[in-house]
Image (spheres, rainbow, N blue to C red):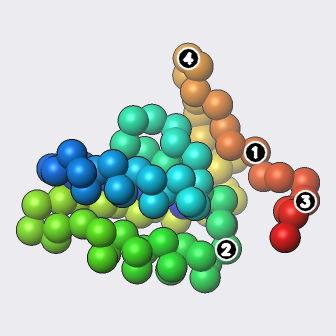
Amino acid sequence: MRYLVCYDIADDRRRQRTSDLLLDYGTRVQESVFECLIEPNLAEQMRSRLEREIDAEEDSVLIFVLCDACVTRMVTLGVARKLEEPEFYIV
């Protein structure tokens, strides 16, 4: 599945830890936006880790699940590029 994760983190230290955490699951596509091609169980793990990392009173994280139809209609402009599904995974 494809997930788009966007965040607005108030504290510099939490923002860096959140960014590092998301690198475990996906690719940074903009400063505070990550695209993650992961299985639902990993998405749940990511969500759980994010909940523990952020301050729910100050921070905001949005996780969008993108269906295959949504991805085919995605438009990129400028230097943006679509994250391609790998042909195979190394386990």
* Quadrant housing the N terminus: bottom right
Between the C-alphas of marks 4 and 3, the distance is: 28 Å
- Residue that label 4 marks: 78
Residue extending furthest toward the right: 87
Q: Determine whether the residue tagged by mark 2 lies in a helix, strand or loop.
A: loop
Q: Residue at x 11, y 61 (%)?
A: 58
Residue extending furthest toward the top: 78
Q: Nearer the viewer, residue 18 or 71?
A: 18
Residue extending furthest toward the front: 13
* Quadrant housing the C terminus: bottom right
Between the C-alphas of marks 2 and 4, the distance is: 29 Å
Residue type at the position of mark 4: Gly
Q: Name the N-terminal-most of marks 2 and 1.
A: 2
Q: Name the N-terminal-most of marks 2 and 4.
A: 2
Q: Name the N-terminal-most of marks 4 and 1.
A: 4
Residue type at the position of mark 1: Glu
- Residue 69, quarter of picture: bottom right
Task: Check the image and report above or below for 78 versus 7.
Answer: above
> Which disc, if any, is residue 84?
1
Q: Position of residue 42 (x, y in %)?
A: 59, 76
Q: Name the N-terminal-most of marks 2 and 3.
A: 2
* Residue 66 visible in the picture: no
- Residue 48, quarter of picture: bottom left
Residue type at the position of mark 3: Phe
Q: Determine whether the residue tagged by mark 3 lies in a helix, strand or loop.
A: loop
Q: Determine whether the residue tagged by mark 4 lies in a helix, strand or loop.
A: loop
Between the C-alphas of marks 4 and 1, the distance is: 17 Å
- Residue that label 3 marks: 88
> Which disc, if any, is residue 39?
2
